[in-house]
Amino acid sequence: MKSYKKELWFNAPERVAFINITSQVEDVLDKSRIKEGLCLINAMHITASVFINDNERGLHEDYQRWLEELAPHEPISQYLHNRTGEDNGDAHLKRQIMGREVVVAVTEGRLDFGPWEQIFYGEFDGRRRKRALVKIIGE
């Protein structure tokens, strides 16, 4: 069995952003030369996520509104975590809801998706450089 690893770096100018990383992951898969196996993609920061869904703007706006209702950013004093001097308690909760990673089957050298599925990096405490790991194992 072979393995291949690459980090993808992001610097979202907004606090909250959803970045479609499907083509970047496909490029990593091509470079790996793995034809059958599994592809893991995970956020390497505790205020970011990786998830699979539709690339539809209205859905992404719905996610932002829904997440803000579940874990509003302000007032920042509502989060015990923010007593450490940070202001990102909400971002930790949003990451927990959206998930840390996804695993996608690799078949005949391609990501094995269902209709409309694409991979997204979800940022909940942006404005600084962060990364996601892509790890592919197989033959």
Image: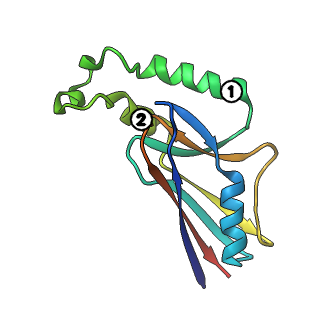
Quadrant position of the N terminus in the picture: bottom right
Decide which of 72, 107 is in the foreground and name it. 72
Q: Point out residue 132 in the picture as x, y percentages from the top left corner.
A: 50, 55
Please tell me whether residue 114 is drawn above or below residue 65 in the rendered image.
below
Give SS at disc 1. helix
Decide which of 68, 30 is in the foreground and name it. 30
Q: Residue at x 67, y 57 (%)?
A: 24
Residue closest to the far top = 75
Please tell me whether residue 95 is drawn above or below residue 106 in the rendered image.
above
Q: Point out residue 109 in the picture as x, y percentages from the top left corner.
A: 77, 71
Label 2 – label 1 distance at C-alpha: 20 Å
Give SS at disc 2. loop
Q: How is the image coloured?
A: rainbow
Q: Which residue is mark 1?
A: 59
Is residue 123 left or right of 138 when viewed as pictured? left
Residue closest to the far bottom = 1
Please tell me whether residue 6 is drawn above or below residue 54 in the rendered image.
below
Choose top left, top right, bottom left or bottom right for residue 8. Answer: bottom right
Which is closer to the viewer, label 2 or label 1? 2
Q: Residues within 10 Å of mark 1 (few under 14, many from 20)?
A: few
Q: Residue at x 70, y 64 (%)?
A: 27
